[in-house]
Image: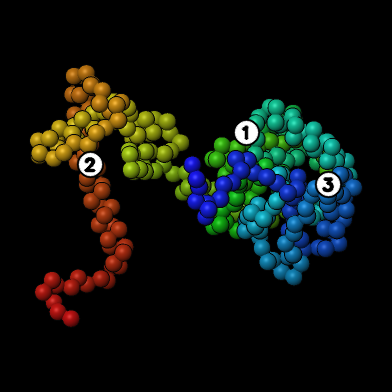
Amino acid sequence: MSMDPAAREIPARKLYKVKYSICTLVNNHAEYGGMVDSFIKGGFTPGDCEYLYIDNSRGNKSEPFAGYNLFLDAAQGQYVILCHQDILLKYDDRKILEQRLGELDKIDPAWGLAGNAGGVAPGTNAVHVTHPAGEQNTGVFPAKVGSLDENFILVKKDANLSLSHDLHGFHFYGTELCQIGRILGWNAWVMDFNLYHKSEGNFDESFYEMSRTIAKKYQRALKGATIQTMGMRLHLSGSAFKNWLRTPSRRRLIFEQQYGDRRKQKRGLPVNKVPEFLAKPLGLGWIVFYWLAHKIRVPFENLISSAAKRRRKFLHRGPNHTPVPPHASH
């Protein structure tokens, strides 16, 4: 088969120019230089690593939510390391990191993010990092987590992760990256990878304000919703019972298809050919059950749909819209 010369085939797997992309927001050039030197000494040499940064030394050009999206998009490495400028590879190096990644590959091929500190469960963290106050080494490694500390996060480029464009600030972006990964089917882990972090974190008022902001966002984002696709209606929520109740079952789909076909036949309308599984007969008991449910459910759905249409029309026109009489001339 000949192909159109305008078409271009892409490889089935991504091809990476380098192994690691080390990405950092920088507001202190000297401190960043020390970080880069420690990485190079630790085996992350420029031959197969790239160092990317955003210069915030003259003001915040970019906060982490927006800046890390730029990094994740621009990075050409198989693995993207998102890290603070105030870390140093004093202890573990690239060889140790690659051993830890090899462990994750065996334990969980669906891992998408890894770090050196994170939250396992309420009240339980997994941490291996050294601060000026001393070494923290708590947990059983590797540990599957729901959040990662932002001092050092390694992202698998294949995961195609990004952060929300409507969140801002310098806290909880590691948490959100883990949640985005979870929704997309990727898992986050804490590895036994010890490095030196000059700071123990900054729990200021913006930290607590951001905790409320991200909680509200996900309250909205994960709120149950009924979605009409071209083929059927889906209910998406965290409740298995609501999903079962509102999303049509196989038997209900068969009933609705056959019920609709009978109504078309009575009106003399053509009936479309349907998939084989929708043409299977239902027992009398199921027909009676779904017919009664249909008669009860449909009037309520029509009422809700009508109210929603009126609301959309009102919002589109605005509250002060004055209808023009049909006979009015211009």
Q: In this view, does 220 lie to the left or right of 113?
A: left
**Residue kind at label 1, given as amino acid type:** Ala
Q: Name the residue under label 1.
A: 110
**Residue kind at label 3, given as amino acid type:** Phe
User: Residue 50 in the image: x percent, y percent?
Assistant: 77, 53
Q: Can you tell which of label 3 and label 2 is closer to the viewer?
A: 3
**Furthest residue in direction front, as rendered:** 2
User: Is residue 120 visible in the rendered structure shown here?
Assistant: no
User: Is residue 291 visible in the rendered structure shown here?
Assistant: yes
User: Residue 158 in the image: x percent, y percent?
Assistant: 63, 42
Q: Which mark is residue 300?
A: 2
Q: Nearer the viewer, residue 139 or 64?
A: 64
Q: Name the residue under label 3.
A: 44
Label 2, residues with CA under 10 Å away: few <14, some 14-19, many ≥20:
few
Q: In this view, does 298 lie to the left or right of 20?
A: left
User: Residue 190 in the image: x percent, y percent?
Assistant: 72, 36
Q: For residue 110, what is the image quadrant?
A: top right
Q: Which of marks 3 and 2 is nearer the N terminus?
A: 3
Answer yes or no: do the residues labelled 2 and 1 have beta carbons within 8 Å?
no
Q: Which of marks 2 and 1 is nearer the N terminus?
A: 1
User: Residue 53 in the image: x percent, y percent?
Assistant: 74, 59
Locate the C terminus by quadrant.
bottom left
What element does badge 3 sit on? loop
Q: Which mark is residue 271?
A: none
